[in-house]
Image: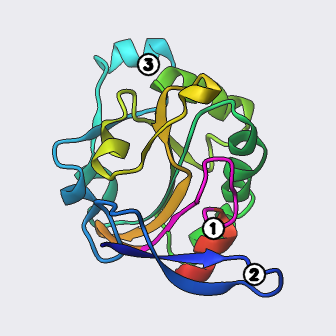
Amino acid sequence: MASALVRRATGGAPRWAAVASRGLAASVGSDIVSAAPGVSLQRARSWDEGVATKFSTTPLKDIFHGKKVVIFGLPGAYTGVCSQAHVPSYKNNIDKLKAKGVDSVICVSVNDPYVLNGWAEKLQAKDAIEFYGDFDGSFHKSLDLEVDLSAALLGRRSHRWSAFVDDGKIKAFNVEKAPSDFKVSGAEVILDQI
């Protein structure tokens, strides 16, 4: 079974632990592009920008190869923890991440790029964070990070997670136990892993 490094809060000082990552296709040491072959993401944009670019997509190799990237996934735009804690943790720590040599910080969600664009603008985070839509969930499904949130009327979505990726190789990988948790996937955790 694949394992990933995650940081668990223990009431006092956090500690590092290797925990089973539910048999995920991606794990520390694996290549994120190879784990999701043929998958492309859609950069957040307005409808008019989509038309102007002929609804272009961005191949994963263009996002990750030759770059140091912090990527985090979340269940959905305009949802509670995502809006109130997850995105703000990265927005508020962007300078610290860049100081550690991170080329880009990316938020990806199972949403269309137009919803993500409106949400990023509402959060005033679009200048700091690159937002990408995984409109059909293929990226998260390839990484075994898909979760059924139909009980919350969201359908198939993403687990809450984060990773530090250097030239396509996953160096740190954190997956929350539940989509509503926010213990191991925030910017503060990734900062300690870079």
Which residue is located at x 72 percent, y 58 percent? 89
For marks 2 and 3, the one nearer the N-term is: 2
Could you say where residue 136 lies in the image, as x and y percent from the top left?
A: 35, 28
Which residue in the rendered view is the most extreme toward the right?
12
Left or right: 69, with 34 as reference point? right
Regarding residue 169, the answer to whether it shows in the image is: yes
Indicate which disc residue 49 carries.
3
Left or right: 113, with 36 as reference point? right
Q: Distance between the residues labelled 2 and 3?
A: 46 Å
Regarding residue 109, the answer to whether it shows in the image is: no
For marks 3 and 1, the one nearer the N-term is: 3
Could you say where residue 2 lies in the image, as x and y percent from the top left?
A: 32, 72
Who is closer to the viewer here, 127 or 77? 77
Element on which disc 3 rests: helix
Could you say where residue 148 lies in the image, as x and y percent from the top left?
A: 48, 35
Q: Kindly identify the amino acid type of the residue bearing the numbered disc 1.
A: Val
Residue behind mark 1: 184
Who is closer to the viewer here, 31 or 3? 3
Query: Which one is in front in this view, the residue at disc 1 or the one at disc 2?
Result: 2
Q: How far apart are marks 1 and 2 (CA)?
A: 12 Å
Query: Which residues make up the magenta segment?
Result: 172-185
Which residue is located at x 82 percent, y 80 percent? 11
Q: Is residue 181 magenta?
A: yes
